[in-house]
Image (spheres, rainbow, N blue to C red):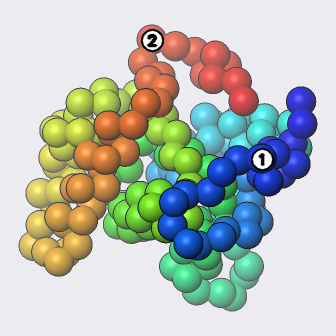
Amino acid sequence: MASMSTERALWPSSSSSFTPQWKYDVFLSFRGKDTRNNFTDHLYFALEQKGILTFRDDEKLKRGKSISPELSKAIEESRLAIVILSSNYAFSTWCLDELTKVIGCIKETGIIVLPIFYNVDPSDVRKQTGTFAQAFAEHEERFKEKVQKWRDALREVANLSGWHSQDREQRQFKA
């Protein structure tokens, strides 16, 4: 299988005038508490074994650098984003800011977004029910100006075709 790096030139860019220079094939967005040491770890190493250059925050961030600008730049420099939506994803303002940036880059850079619904129902993400409702109840007062953007980004990602992990074993999600 050819590396996605070699296929970049073959994929059309978005209709915008921005011509991206991709540094990463894939940007992984995930809630570390839920998936870092299991699903995300397996996915990351499977992608790397296939020669797919993958950005994962704990592997690629330069020590001593501010996290937010570095993550934003990594998203802009990625051809694809895999968003692993888990039960605690919306409790993390970092994850929600990351997701908002990813969704914005659909039009800005032509990033392709592939959601994985990891032990959550896509409709809970779309409608922000269950743990997603709990998370937003906590965020409403403290982050009033960002909440609507976060809600919109979750709805948008939940409306994309992706994978649903319920009733599947982790090994069935091969890269």
Residue drawn at (45%, 61%) of the image:
107
Q: Is residue 142 left or right of residue 9?
A: left
Residue 31: percent from the left, percent from the top?
Answer: 47, 51
Q: Is residue 160 left or right of residue 25?
A: left
Q: Quadrant of the N terminus?
A: top right
Q: Is residue 161 above or below residue 4?
A: above
Front in this rendered view, residue 2 or 67: 2
Rendered image quadrant of residue 110: bottom right
Determine which residue is flagged by label 2. Answer: 167
Label placed on residue 91: none
Of the two numbered discs 2 and 1 on the same chain, state the one appearing first in sequence: 1
Label placed on residue 10: 1
Residue 165: percent from the left, percent from the top?
Answer: 47, 22
Q: Is residue 172 above or below residue 7?
A: above
Q: Is residue 3 left or right of residue 70?
A: right
Rendered image quadrant of residue 19: bottom right
Tell me which amino acid carries mark 2: Asp
